[in-house]
Image (spheres, rainbow, N blue to C red):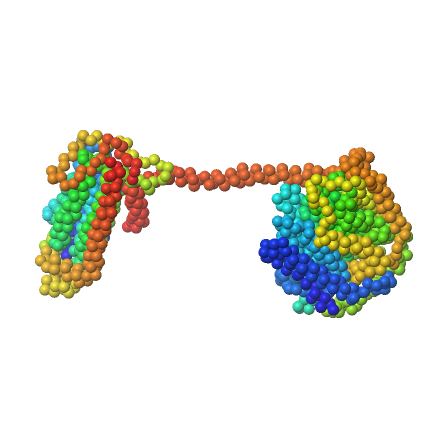
């Protein structure tokens, strides 16, 4: 099974790549059918991904499982080829040790060999994400057939979408931090190209540039994190490898190291790695303070916004943190920072979204807010938190793609107008869009029993568990004996089991990192620095922030619904005769996504399939994570709180907007100066302009002046010297041949005289 | 065979003739006189060659002089044709009439001071007219624009 | 090494330097210039004479000769006429002076013992080439004295360059004679030279002997003033250098054809030009 599954795994990135290449090569010839290669490639990849998912489920099993039962972690690695190999990347000893950086245990000094294999991995996390990427990608591609028709860049769009699916699936399938970095950049490049798809529009070009530059900050963080990882762990592979000479190299996220409780470096270096990764995740997943690019990215085509900027690419940060869970768990301060960033972002983005009038921008800020939710869940560092984040990621991919495609459908019908104040009563004009949008809105707002309700509930539950550890304490005790590491997991890898490491009941208090301050909650040691943030009171605050965000989410979602689809029918004049329901190519994906948004949550929650399935991921199989596994339960108190918040939000939205003309006076007028603050997006752009852009521009002007006046001036002055010589000497070019002959004779004479002088007796 | 003293004397004569010819070809602007100067240089060379030939008792030098004579005849024939063509174009036998090789933005070199014509009265040999007298207007500038 | 040459080295050097300066000044004064005056020309002639004497004296001190009056006469004619050729304003006079030079040169050649070349120079140059020059002058010379005949191009620098070159040549010739075997210097007169040549003195003479022996064994040795000199030269030309002679003949033909071709094409241009001009 692993080998065949691994072989199939190659197809998932390969098919969209082939589709992209075919589209590039044949695009012009295919004309209006240019979507065929890309859609076929992504579709085939989706089929393969579903097969892989089924196979993995078969292997791991996702049935209801007792928390005490050991979970078998599973991964299968496929090495395609060796990309780069440096035999002496470092000389002799580990550089980290010389640089004073702590070296993780189990690092084999293999003489400094450094190699980057192109290796793909299959584990539950990858299988899940591959399914989401290819599935949503396929639906969006089909939708785009209707949405993008008659666009002059039709083939280009599909080539880019296929290219993006390729990059994203490689990103989640790569088994090496350097490969992750490569495709991290690749999805950024695809995003840049798609935001700037209508590059003749200045706003689109500017938005693309902004997205690229802001992402660059995060990518910088990832690059440094990768360097630090290599210096600390001596490898960049996720999985354990056995070299040709028999050396066993523990992968950073390999099963050996994960099982080893002292395998991860904590302290300053560990925290630095985690915070740099958090910076990278903030850039890609549009968290504060790097969120400013996502709203502007709405200048791109709506399908691209749905695919990249709502459903898949922005979840790369979530994926990275989940994948690196063992690293984060070793640094509670960094984990808490993840949650703080997430909660703050969620709240701020939700506040901004309440006063936006551009439908796509409302959804963009909602995306930022929901990603913040996922970060909050990740930051808890518990099994429940990680699985909740991925759960929310999946459901969010469905309903946010649905909402974006619905918004695109509205925009398509309204002749490109997206300002909600100019719409009204569109449910009469485009009923399918209205119904599906409403389903998506319910899911986003957390209305039971739609998907968002359950995933949001899990997020809140994970927060609540951290905020009130005593209330959930019994779970911890039970979990203490959990997680006997399976011995046969190594046979899957084909490597011999490493040195026996008797697994001790690994509650977080007994786990001690070797370096630096490792205080955790419940620990008797004094917490210092960032780790001091990890305190129940902090989590309590974060919980209430998240709950407030839930209410705001419901408010702005339904505000958008009411403004767009209810009230008297108003259609902007740009729509002309175009105001009708969208073609089937566009409505079919809407319907599919609506069904998923409606039912995926309830199915996944009550079967608990997703969390059990994900628990088999090696990263989540770390003792510290396993220790936090709790019995899956429905928390009525938290559910009631969440539902109440959503109900209040919807009620306020209904009071303000239901049945009114959407351009009538808005609720914002009651907000006073706060409304201005929200409408101006907390002045983030202005602050960045003042603090970063303007000083940089001034520096650029100074350097430009230096370049032109001094550097160029020097070069020009040097260039003047031969010119001056030339203008002096050219006067001798009189054109009189006799003077030339005379010059020749004088020259010969000079030579003869010199010779005579030299040969004198 | 000639003695070494004769050799040095002959070489000296050859050197003088050569140098005079050189000075002539460098200074005189009349194309005909320049050619005469060239022939003068050839004469100097011929004298030198013959002197060495006689000194060494080797016929090679004298043979070479025969060839020099031949080539001089060829050269004179071709070159004089060119001189005639040049005269046909400018109406003058002036080597300085051609200045097209000069830098583009430099002015033409023009003789500004000329000696008075009356000091040397040319006395032409009384030959019967054998061709059309070329028409040149000395009162105009020394230079013509066309080349 | 050689007592004669070492004894005369210093005065010879001074003499040479003076002669070079004199010939340069003389040439400069004599060459056509805007600032010519009768006095300057006379001074030029004077300096030229002084320089000639100086060079002759140099030659004397170098080679201890000069007693050959015939050689001195013809050499003087050649040199003075050559000087006159390049300093005369009128090209016609130049040509006539050049004819005089040719006469002097042919005399020098005769004295050197190259009878055929001496005659050939007169015949070919004075008889053919010079006449051609005069024809061209007749065709091309504008009426009156042309302005460009009255000025020279860079007279001072060119005169200095020529004089320095002459000085260098003289110096090297002097060094040459100083390096000669003393035997040569001890044979001042022509008669002695002829007598000495009869007995091969060195390798060069032996080689010469051999070559002449090959051609005319009966008259080996007495080549100077030899009645068979022309025959020897002819045998040499059409023997060893037959191919070169043929090539030279082809060259003559080619230049003839070329000259005609250029003239015939140029005449159309000339007539065109005339038609346009008038």
Q: Residue furthest left?
A: C227
How many labels were placed on the picture?
Answer: 0
Residue closest to the eye, C127 or A477: C127
- In this picture, is A627 found above or below A443? below
Left or right: C134 with respect to A447? left
Residue A570, how many percent across, how many down? 75, 40
- In this picture, is A316 found above or below A501? above
Residue closest to the eye, A670 or A105: A670
Residue visible at 70% across and 55% down?
A: A142
User: Which quadrant is home to the N terminus of chain A?
Assistant: bottom right
Q: Quadrant of residue A565?
A: top right
Residue C138, how many percent across, how many down? 17, 41
Residue B114, how many percent across, how many down? 24, 32
Specify whether residue A169 is in view. Answer: yes
Residue visible at 24% across and 36% down?
A: C278
Left or right: C117 with respect to A539? left
Residue closest to the eye, C222 or A705: A705
Specify whether residue A238 is in view. Answer: no
Q: Quadrant of residue A671?
A: top right
Residue visible at 19% across and 61% down?
A: C242
Residue visible at 62% across and 50% down?
A: A153
């Amino acid at each position: 099974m692993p080998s065949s599954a691994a072989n199939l795994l190659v197809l998932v990135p390969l098919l969209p790549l082939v589709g992209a290449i075919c589209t590039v090569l044949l695009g012009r010839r295919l004309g209006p059918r240019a979507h065929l290669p890309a859609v076929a490639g992504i579709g085939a990849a989706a089929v393969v991904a579903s097969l892989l998912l089924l196979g993995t489920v078969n292997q791991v099993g996702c049935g209801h499982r007792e928390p005490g039962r050991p979970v078998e972690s599973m991964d299968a690695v496929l090495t395609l080829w060796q990309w780069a190999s440096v035999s002496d990347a470092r000389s002799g000893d580990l550089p980290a040790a010389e640089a004073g950086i702590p070296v993780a245990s189990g690092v084999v000094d293999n003489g400094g060999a450094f190699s980057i294999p192109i290796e793909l991995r299959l584990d539950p996390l990858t299988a899940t994400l591959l399914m989401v990427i290819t599935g949503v990608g396929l639906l969006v591609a089909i939708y785009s057939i209707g949405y993008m028709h008659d666009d002059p860049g039709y083939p280009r769009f599909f080539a880019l979408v296929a290219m993006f699916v390729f990059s994203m699936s490689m990103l989640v399938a790569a088994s090496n931090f350097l490969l992750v970095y490569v495709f991290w950049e690749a999805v950024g490049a695809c995003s840049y190209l798609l935001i700037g798809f209508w590059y003749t529009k200045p706003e689109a070009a500017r938005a693309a540039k902004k997205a690229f530059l802001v992402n660059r900050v995060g990518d910088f963080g990832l690059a440094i994190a990768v360097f630090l990882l290599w210096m600390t762990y001596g490898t960049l592979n996720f999985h354990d490898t056995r070299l040709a000479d028999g050396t066993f190299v523990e992968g950073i996220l390999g099963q050996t190291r994960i099982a080893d409780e002292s395998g991860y470096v904590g302290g300053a270096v560990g925290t630095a790695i985690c915070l740099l990764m958090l910076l990278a995740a903030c850039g890609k997943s549009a968290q504060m303070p790097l969120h400013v690019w996502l709203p502007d990215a709405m200048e791109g085509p709506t399908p691209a916004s749905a695919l990249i900027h709502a459903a898949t690419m922005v979840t790369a940060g979530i994926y990275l943190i989940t994948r690196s869970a063992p690293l984060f768990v070793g640094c509670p301060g960094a984990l808490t920072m993840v949650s703080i960033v997430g909660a703050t972002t969620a709240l701020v983005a939700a506040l901004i979204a309440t006063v936006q009038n551009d439908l796509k921008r409302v959804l963009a800020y909602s995306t930022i807010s929901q990603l913040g939710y996922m970060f909050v869940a990740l930051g808890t560092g518990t099994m429940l938190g990680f699985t909740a984040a991925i759960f929310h990621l999946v459901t969010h991919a469905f309903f946010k793609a649905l909402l974006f495609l619905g918004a695109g459908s509205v925009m398509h019908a309204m002749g490109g107008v997206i300002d909600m104040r100019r719409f009204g009563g569109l449910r009469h004009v485009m009923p399918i869009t209205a119904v599906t949008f409403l389903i998506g809105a319910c899911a986003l707002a957390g209305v039971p029993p739609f998907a968002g309700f359950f995933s949001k509930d899990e997020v809140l539950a994970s927060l609540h568990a951290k905020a009130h550890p005593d209330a959930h304490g019994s779970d911890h005790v039970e979990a203490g004996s959990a997680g006997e590491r399976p011995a046969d997991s190594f046979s899957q890898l084909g490597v011999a089991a490493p040195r026996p490491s008797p697994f001790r009941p690994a509650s977080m208090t007994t786990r001690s990192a070797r370096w630096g301050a490792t205080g955790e909650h419940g620990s008797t040691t004094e917490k210092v620095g960032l780790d001091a943030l990890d305190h129940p009171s902090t989590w309590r605050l974060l919980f209430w922030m998240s709950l407030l965000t839930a209410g705001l989410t419901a408010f702005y979602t339904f505000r958008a619904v009411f403004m767009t689809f209810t009230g008297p029918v108003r259609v902007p004049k740009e729509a002309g005769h175009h105001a009708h329901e969208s073609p089937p190519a566009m409505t079919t994906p809407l319907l599919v996504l609506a069904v998923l948004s409606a039912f995926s949550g309830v199915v996944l929650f009550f079967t608990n399939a997703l969390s059990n399935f994900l628990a088999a991921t090696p990263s989540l199989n770390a003792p510290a994570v396993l220790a936090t596994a709790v019995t899956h339960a429905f928390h009525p108190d938290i559910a009631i709180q969440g539902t109440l918040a959503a109900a209040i939000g919807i009620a306020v939205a209904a009071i303000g907007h239901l049945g009114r003309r959407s351009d009538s006076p808005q609720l914002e007028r009651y907000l006073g100066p706060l409304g201005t603050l929200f409408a101006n997006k907390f002045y983030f752009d202005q602050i960045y302009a003042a603090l970063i852009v303007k000083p940089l521009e001034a520096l650029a002007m100074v350097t430009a002046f230096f370049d032109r006046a001094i550097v160029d001036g020097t070069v020009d002055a040097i260039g003047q010297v031969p010119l001056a010589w030339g203008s002096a000497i050219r006067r001798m070019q009189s054109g009189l041949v006799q003077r030339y002959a005379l010059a020749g004779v004088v020259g010969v004479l000079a030579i003869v005289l010199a010779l005579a002088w030299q040969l004198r007796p | 065979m000639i003695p070494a003293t004769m050799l040095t004397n002959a070489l000296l004569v050859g050197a003088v003739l050569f140098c005079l010819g050189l000075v002539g070809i460098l200074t005189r602007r009349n194309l005909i006189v320049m050619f005469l100067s060239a022939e003068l240089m050839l004469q100097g060379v011929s004298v030198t060659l013959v002197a060495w030939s006689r000194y060494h008792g080797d016929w090679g030098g004298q043979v070479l002089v025969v060839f020099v004579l031949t080539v001089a005849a060829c050269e004179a024939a071709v070159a004089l044709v060119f001189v005639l063509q040049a005269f046909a174009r400018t109406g003058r036998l002036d080597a300085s009439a051609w200045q097209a090789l000069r830098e583009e933005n430099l002015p033409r070199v023009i003789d500004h001071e000329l000696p008075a014509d009356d000091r040397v009265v040319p006395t032409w040999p009384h030959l019967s007219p054998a061709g059309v007298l070329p028409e040149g207007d000395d009162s105009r500038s020394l230079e013509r624009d066309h080349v | 090494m050689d007592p004669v040459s070492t004894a005369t080295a210093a005065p010879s050097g001074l003499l040479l330097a003076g002669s070079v300066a004199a010939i340069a000044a003389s040439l400069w004064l004599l060459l056509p210039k805007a600032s010519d005056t009768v006095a300057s020309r006379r001074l030029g002639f004077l300096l030229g004479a002084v320089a000639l004497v100086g060079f002759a004296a140099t030659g004397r001190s170098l080679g201890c000769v000069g007693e050959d009056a015939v050689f001195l006469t013809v050499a003087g004619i050649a040199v003075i006429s050559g000087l006159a050729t390049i300093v005369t304003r009128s090209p016609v006079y130049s040509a006539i002076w050049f004819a005089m030079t040719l006469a002097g040169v042919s005399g020098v050649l005769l004295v050197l013992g190259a009878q055929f070349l001496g005659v050939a120079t007169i015949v070919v140059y004075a008889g053919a080439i010079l006449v051609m020059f005069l024809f061209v002058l007749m065709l091309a010379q504008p009426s009156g004295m042309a302005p460009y005949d009255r000025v020279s191009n860079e007279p001072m620098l060119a005169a200095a360059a020529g004089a320095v070159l002459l000085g260098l040549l003289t110096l090297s010739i002097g060094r040459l004679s100083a390096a000669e075997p003393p035997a040569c210097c001890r044979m001042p007169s022509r008669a002695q030279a002829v007598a000495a040549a009869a007995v091969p003195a060195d390798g060069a003479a032996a080689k010469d002997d051999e070559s002449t022996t090959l051609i005319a064994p009966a008259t080996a040795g007495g080549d100077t003033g030899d009645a068979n000199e022309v025959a020897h030269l002819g045998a040499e030309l059409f023997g060893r250098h037959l191919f070169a002679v043929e090539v030279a003949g082809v060259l003559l033909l080619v230049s003839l054809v070329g000259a005609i071709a250029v003239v015939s094409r140029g005449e159309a241009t000339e007539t065109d030009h005339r038609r346009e001009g008038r």
